[in-house]
Amino acid sequence: MTDNMRGVILMTVAMAAFVGNDTIMKLVTEEMPLFQAIFLRGLVTVAGLGLILGRGRVALRGIEPHDRRLIGWRTFGELAATITFLYALTRMPLATLSAIMQAAPLAVTLAAALFLRAPIGIRRLAAILTGFLGVLLIVRPGSGDFGIEAVLGLVSVGFVVLRDLTTRQLGRAVPSVFVALVAAVSVTVMGGIGTLLSGIWVGVSPRIALLILLGGSFLVAGYLSAVAAMRVGDIDLVAPLRYTSLVFALILGWVVFGDWPETLTLIGAAIVVATGIYTFYREQKLARRAGRG
């Protein structure tokens, strides 16, 4: 098996794992308060990432103050993106929310051009604007289907942009597993504080406990698979496979919840995915030209 084939398989597994976690959280929050579900899943995730960090003997010395500040902003973005995404997930179909989130790579590219002065050509800008039109088809402002959950989905995209932009600026010496562990601990603490403030704690049945354990395991597996995929395969081939998450969301949304998006939502999702893939390939093509120059 070639490295590229391993990369393709690993990235596909990662996307399936992330959507599997989303599906489980939607199921769990039907019987359990959101913050309690976040807290319990976080315990599983922190334990898994902590074990990996310990066994891998990752060096944590020498993290620069600049990187610490970036980790702080990244963690804030992770916290805000998590709560807005999961709250939206409790109130809207999985596939529809997943379709909205596909706009995140486009938004990151645009934000990098605006705030990090990354070069962006007219073709990529046109593709990004076209992708955002696809998002409008998905959320349809002004229609009866446009509610607070759609707004929260869009807000979540904004916080994902903050998270990813700060991640791009981290020094190479910062271990990826450590960054993920900091975010996981912060999300878990947030879930615990939210639970305490709400004063609501429901009993955990064996079924829910199993689902939470599975959801946390999916998160850890998804993270590790995504990192491994980017390291063993060519980025041109592997990265666009992130959009397979929409396929898994469509399948699981239909099988588990009986939801199937409307035609306009599917058309909008197709536009977002197509423009996202085009934008990525355009970025890689320009990067190769710059490398040769």
Image: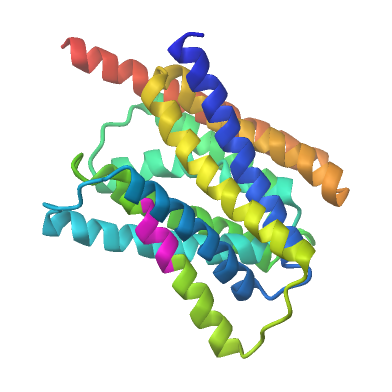
Image height check: is 56 above or below 66?
above
Q: Is residue 185 magenta?
A: yes
x, y (%) of residue 242?
A: 54, 32
Q: Left of 239 or right of it: where is 153?
A: right
User: What is the quadrant of residue 274 in the picture?
Assistant: top right
Magenta highlight range:
180-186
User: What is the quadrant of residue 122 in the picture?
Assistant: top left
User: Which residue is nearer to you in this view: 109 or 183?
Assistant: 183
x, y (%) of residue 156?
A: 52, 58
In this view of the protein, can residue 200 be seen by the observer?
yes
x, y (%) of residue 41?
A: 58, 62
Q: Residue at x 48, y 42 (%)?
A: 223
Q: Left of 282 or right of it: where is 191?
A: right
Q: Left of 286 or right of it: where is 190?
A: right
User: What is the quadrant of residue 84 in the picture?
Assistant: bottom right
x, y (%) of residue 63?
A: 15, 53
In this view of the protein, can residue 146 be seen by the observer?
no
Seen as rendered, the residue at the extreme right is: 258
Q: Residue at x 26, y 48 (%)?
A: 115
User: Which residue is nearer to you in this view: 196 or 283?
Assistant: 196
Seen as rendered, the residue at the extreme front is: 55
Quarter in which the C terminus is drawn? top left
Q: Is residue 96 magenta?
A: no
- Give the number of marks: 0
User: Which residue is nearer to you in this view: 261 or 145?
Assistant: 261
Classified by dominant secondary structure, the portion drawn in magenta counts as helix
Image height check: is 62 above or below 229?
below
User: Which residue is nearer to you in this view: 116 or 214?
Assistant: 214
Q: Residue at x 58, y 49 (%)?
A: 217
